[in-house]
Amino acid sequence: INVMYLKGLLYYCNKDYVRAVQVFTKFRKNYSTDKWYDDATYWLGLSFYNLEQYKDAIKILTTIKDKKSSAYYIMSNLYLARCYKQLKEYDSAKVLLSKLLQQKDINEKIKTSILYELGECYKLSGDYHMAIQYFGMLENTSDELKIAGKISIAEIYYQIGKIDEAKKRLEEILGMYKMSSGLLTKAKLMYAM
């Protein structure tokens, strides 16, 4: 393994994204034929994402998003969609996420993330009906995104003035699930409204 690549990965893992960007950029410039090039490209894109430099992340991740043979094909597309979502380019995000859902070799955890992200994109773009549909698809999952989806549905009901339905959903969540302190706080704050 290339030492420079490992150095960049170490910076990334230690959340020193600025240094990770510097090292991965230098790596890509100096080792364009190295077998770790796509890996470095992926981590460079994620470093930009974590620095909230979404346009830079899109520029980098786009270079590997179509390489279906890449180990990072699915995740690079997922992060591209997240970048578009952060830039409020919801239609672009939805197109990418919908294409990802059609992949046959996608594991359940990633599929759950994609469904949640689609729900968020529809919610943020004001298409509450579709948002509720996607959040509802999380019902059969066992992950925290299931709870986050239920909270998002309650938020939608609250936003459209169906306060009783929102409270009913939140009571269900508060009564049935163990959740992280962040989600619990969000649910309790919404319930207090």
Image (spheres, helix red, strand yellow):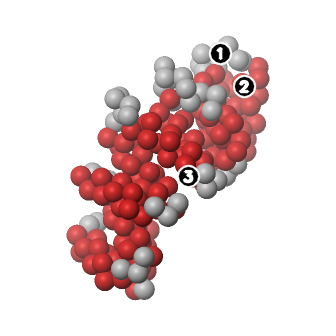
Q: Taking 28 as reference, is 186 left or right?
A: left
Q: CA distance from mark 3 to mark 2?
A: 32 Å
Pointers 2 and 1 in contact (CB under 8 A)?
yes
Image height check: is 2 above or below 41?
above
Which residue is at 50% across, 64% downward?
Answer: 126
Tell me residue 36's x, y (percent). Answer: 60, 21
Q: Could you tell me the amino acid type at mark 1?
A: Asp
The residue lying toward the viewer, choosing from 77 and 142, is: 77
Q: CA distance from mark 1 to mark 3?
A: 35 Å
Tell me residue 5's x, y (percent). Answer: 65, 27
**Which residue is tagged 1?**
34
Q: Which label sits in the foreground, 1 or 3? A: 3
**Which residue is tagged 2?**
27
Picture quadrant of residue 153? bottom left
Q: CA distance from mark 2 to mark 1?
A: 9 Å
Query: Within 10 angstroms of label 3, few (less than 14), some, or many (20 or more) residues?
Result: many
Picture quadrant of residue 149? bottom left
| Residue that sits furthest to the top in the current view | 33
Query: Within 10 angstroms of label 1, few (less than 14), some, or many (20 or more) residues?
Result: some
The residue lying toward the viewer, choosing from 139 and 181, is: 139
Give me the disc on residue 90. 3
Image height check: is 30 above or below 127?
above
| Labels 3 and 2: the sequence-earlier one | 2
Q: Secondary structure at mark 3?
A: helix
Image height check: is 64 above or below 46?
above
Which residue is at 56% across, 52% downward?
Answer: 90
